[in-house]
Amino acid sequence: METKVLFAGFGGQGVLLMGQLLCKAAMHEDFEVSWMPSYGPEMRGGEANCGVVVADEPIGSPLVTEPDVAVIMNKPSLDKFESQVRSGGTILYNSSLIDRKPARGDVRVIAVNCNDIAQELGNPRVANMVMLGAFNKAATNLPVESLIGALRATLGESKEKLIPINRKAIETGEALV
Amino acid sequence: MAVVFEKTKALTDATLSYCPGCTHGIIHRLVAESIDELGVMEKSIGVAPVGCAVFAYDFFNIDMQQAAHGRAPAVATGIKRVHPNNVVFTYQGDGDLASIGMAEIVHAAARGEKITTIFVNNAIYGMTGGQMAPTTLVGQVTTTSPYGRNPELCGMPVRMAEMLGGLAGAAYVARVSVHNVRAVNEAKRAIKKAFELQIAGKGFTMVEVLSTCPTNWGMNPVEALGWVESNMIPYYPLGVFKDVSKDAVLASKDVSAKEAN
Amino acid sequence: MAKLLMKGNEAIAEAAIRAGCRYFFGYPITPQNQIPEYMSKRMPQVGGTFLQAESEVAAINMVYGAAGAGARVMTSSSGPGISLKQEGITYIVGAELPCVIVNIMRGGPGLGSIQPSQSDYFQATRGGGHGDYNMPVLAPASVAEAAELTAKAFDLADKYRTPVLVLGDGMIGQMMEPVDMPEAFPQTVPEKPWATVGWSDKSARPRAVVNSLYIDPKVLEQHNIRLQEKYVKIAAEQVQVATELTDDAEIVLVAYGTMSRIARSAVRAARAEGIKVGLIRPITLWPFPSDTIRQAAKTAERFLVIEMSAGQMIEDVKLALNGARPVGFYGRMGGMVPSVDEVLSEIRKTARKGE
């Protein structure tokens, strides 16, 4: 088993963090993982993406050029990466911000209005966690506790108070799929 | 028999490799005597440059490192950061310090690196055979300025002491000469003071010493000493350009007094 | 100890600290910036020194000074900065000082790109600066191995009084992977009586002079002979290489660093197609595992070298084989990374040549 995931969006949407949380959670579940950010000039232009590989044996290439799953948080990323997704793969896209559906007919498409849901939950900043929940349900199916554990390890003790809202966001995201 | 004079222990017995009449030898002795008199020989580490003083590691009777051309202040920084309680100094010429090593000396001074730099300015590249240095005077003939230094082509000679004295990290910057006995005594006081302020942890210290190069200037030693007085000192005024141990007013008075001389 | 998810650059920095490195001198350049950034945060916590130098030239000369003063010291950069450091590196070699240098390679020549590349292989393995010299070059293929080899580099440097180069690329530097790092790496630090620490005529050791100048050619030749003897010893003692599926391989791929991972994926895919292919992964690029290459030639009919360059390591493979087997090459340049499919297609082509 080897799953290659691309997370893409604007800088500030928590795209790199989503990838890291997936890695840490999968690592906790004894999977092999790798996380590779785009560090090219485009990061100066405000776009961010990272490729994550989750596997049950040592990972070959950490580059995700033909993702099994693409998690798309903004329209420029959909335009850029839609064609790269493996036939038979999955695209989760942020339907709160992207005004078109993916055109591909050979992939599973899941719309997640994560910004709207985050707003309803009372914290617009957890949009990425809503998306991460939806992604996890659709693709990796890791225990929610592993994702929460990863988040806890990343945020540190001082931000423990943010855990409940993030948990709620992940669970809401999972329920969408 | 009574001992009336003893050579400083901070110099080895090796024969100096400098040309007859060159004042490097005097400057070596002033540095060595200062280290000896301050009782810090055992914790002094020197850095030799590339240039005529490249063999300084054979002459100073202490632990020494030899640095790439111009990089002595960076090497000294590495040493001082590892051994902050040791006394670390660089001994550099004008090509080494003011040309290829300009970045290293400026940033060592800017950082307030607690080292002492002995900067020997003889307005020429000695070791390589008398080429033009950044400190070569206007009109001065060298092997790469055969028609005399033309400021239209090469700009004006660089006054390092003035430049580095203006940096906040500098604790003590002085320009001295060794062309006569009185100047040698002044030079000794400045060098010793620079080491004292380094030991006190005040910051970067540098003594620029105007020196001769009879060989490449094409003069005999006496003429060369006279040339320092008549040609170099008017452009490179002697004095103290920064001294954190005095207040700022006094320090600047010191400079203007020297310039008036 | 629990596994940590770390960036390659951060793992290299942390491993250095856990290997006793307490002095770091560097200058910003992508894609290695997380090394100095991490060091600037960690060094004060462990009583060490981080200094951002005014240039790569200054940084490597600070390394010279600190190494000459007896410390475990390190610097890091990428291609353009490593080129600037060559002056200092050859002086460090000449003065026989131990230190660790990290090159997180990017595309060149010139300012090139900031994407991963392996085009500094020649510079790394042929010395790089002026004069007759080599230095151990360690090429990690994963974040965990980057940490392990960085720690090892300090011991090698001290053991042989030589700079040691850790050669990664932008991928290794930027990617995150799990790392299981010991609290402290085992360290073998020999006495350093040659270090400048302050001396008097009462000292048991002779006066220390850290120097690379030997003005008498007879003396300099002797110095060079001693250096060459040291390189022979390192070559005999320190070759490190990994092989996979080479026992019955008719085609052997040779790839190092991150490229070896892509090659490995392609090898597995080719095996699934019934092609008898294996992989040799040099971990030390200098000394190069020539014996392993020659050994593989007993079964292998063809070799295929995969690099992110125009073909540099291939010369070492050819030198090892000395014409005994044909050696093919596939590479991408300028920051482009060969894909598994591209490599697989090259393996298929190579297999067809053998039919």
Image (cartoon, rainbow, N blue to C red):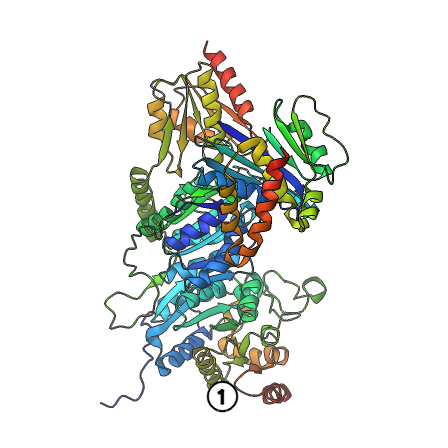
Task: Specify the subunit that label 1 lies on.
Answer: B
Q: Say which residue appears at 32% left-offset and 40% top-offset.
A: C238
Q: Position of residue A6 (x, y in %)?
A: 60, 35
> Three-letter amino acid code at disc 1?
Arg
Q: Residues within 10 Å of mark 1 (few under 14, many from 20)?
A: few
Q: Position of residue C105 (x, y in %)?
A: 53, 42
All told, the count of numbered labels is: 1
Residue at numbered disc 1: B182
Q: Quadrant of the C terminus of chain A?
A: top right
Numbered disc 1: secondary structure: helix
- B81 w.r.t. B256: above or below: above
In the image, farthest residue toward the right: A99
- B28 w.r.t. A172: above or below: below
Q: Position of residue A174 (x, y in %)?
A: 59, 37
Q: Say which residue appears at 48% left-offset and 20% top-offset.
A: C269
Q: Say which residue appears at 43% left-offset and 69% top-offset.
A: B18
Position of residue B7 in the picture relative to residue C77 (left or right) = left
Between A171 and B183, the residue placed more toward the observer is: A171
Position of residue C47 in the picture relative to residue C175 (left or right) = left
**What is the quadrant of residue B123 in the picture?**
bottom right
The reply to whether residue C127 is visible in this rendering is no
Q: Position of residue C48 (x, y in %)?
A: 42, 62
- B92 w.r.t. C159: above or below: below
The reply to whether residue A68 is visible in this rendering is yes
Between A173 and C96, the residue placed more toward the observer is: A173
